[in-house]
Amino acid sequence: MDVSLLAKLLEDNNQPKFRLEQVKKAIFQDGVFSFENITTISKELREKLKENLDILSFFPDKTLVSKDKRSIKALLKLKDGNLIETVFISPKPNIWSACISSQVGCPLGCGFCATGKGGFKRNLTAEEITDQILYWKQYMKKKGLAGVFSNIVYMGMGEPFLNWEEVSKSLRNLTDPDLFGFSSRSISVSTAGIPEGIEKLAMKFPQINLAVSLHFSADEKRDKFMPINKKHNLEKLKNSLRSYFTHCNRKVFLEYILLENVNDSLEDAQDLIKYLKSIGNFHLLHVNLIRYNSTSDKLKPSSSSVAREFKNYLLRNGVNVTIRKSLGEDIQGACGQLAGR
Ligand code: SF4
């Protein structure tokens, strides 16, 4: 929702200053989904707001709930007709986390990702980014979903650091105690490895978590599956992580999708360890292994036993590592599966 428009509307209607706070609380904290339901303001004002302002900057098109009910995917139609997706995940009972998009499509074209295959249409505005959070707050309220909405990850469609202006505005709004009031530490931004973005995040939002989609630790393979590596190779990524650590003494999450016979051999594990050790601050690096979620006929996920062996090898070599359980695969809502359809 456009807060500046809300403030102007209230001012034009000669409302006292505290009215803005009342409406903001109802929308951003209580997840009220219609002005009609804000009972702390007059009926006349509710109608004025309803006529002149939309709470959401898109129309929810479709929602899919996974069989285990721990993952919900929403397809959202933006006002210009473009479609984006966002996912709500419950990694633990009564804990909910939103995975949000920052662009319509993605220009980076990673070979294992459904979003990348659809190409890039445009950047999302800060409002369209944060409205995904409003949408899930409202969803919880409407459906009576129990639990706490505690985390946000910028891991949906798009590369957040290629939309820095709007992403940084959205981060300010999400952490603003007068709006959403999320703590910085509960938000993670994930990048395919854009050095300028990593630097800006460290300087402007040192408490926000950084996640890097690493996936390969040899340039030849990374070039093949992640074209961004031709511009910003592993050496550049290493240097930007080193510089990140000079500003932030915080854990960095490295995502590693396990693809059968592509990046899951003993040699791949050894390359990964060598690369991690070369970055420095080894204790602050945490590898999340994710068995590939199918989006292509050519690529297959590594088997569970190979994933376990890979993990154990890393563990024996001192790497902080977990196998991240993929949620929402049956609704095409898992990592790399969002295609906006
Ligand atoms: S993995 Fe991320 S960066 Fe790569 S194409 Fe998909 S959305 Fe873009």
Image (cartoon, rainbow, N blue to C red):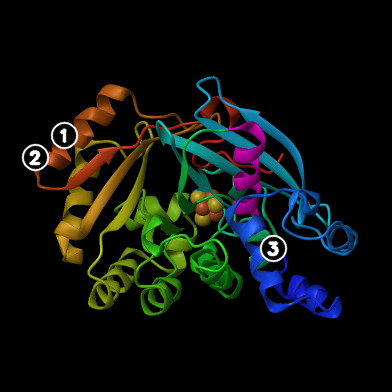
Depth check, front residue: 76 or 212: 76
Left or right of residue 99: residue 210: left
Q: What label sits on residue 23 in the rendered view? A: 3
Q: Give the mark nearest the N terminus, 2 or 3.
A: 3
Depth check, front residue: 241 or 63: 63
For disc 2, the neighbor class at 10 Å (few under 14, some 14 to 19, many from 20) is: few
Left or right of residue 329: residue 248: left
Q: Which residue is mark 1?
A: 312
Residue at the image position 55 percent from the left and 29 percent from the top:
297
Left or right of residue 30: residue 275: left
Q: CA distance from mark 1 to mark 2?
A: 6 Å
Residue 126 location in percent, x, y?
Answer: 64, 67
Q: Is residue 254 above or below residue 341?
A: below
Q: Which residue is mark 2?
A: 316
Mark 2 belongs to which amino acid? Answer: Arg
* Number of the front mark, 2 or 3: 3
Q: Is residue 246 above or below residue 175?
A: below
Residue at the image position 88 percent from the left and 64 percent from the top:
52
Residue 233 location in percent, x, y?
Answer: 37, 65
Residue at the image position 79 percent from the left and 74 percent from the top:
10
Q: What label sits on residue 35 in the rendered view? A: none
Q: Give the mark nearest the N terminus, 1 or 3.
A: 3
Question: Does residue 124 show up?
Answer: no
Give, as a single range, the part of the protein colored magenta: 131-144
**At numbered mark 3, what does the secondary structure look like: helix, strand or loop?**
helix
Left or right of residue 167: residue 53: right
Residue at the image position 27 percent from the left and 78 percent from the top:
247
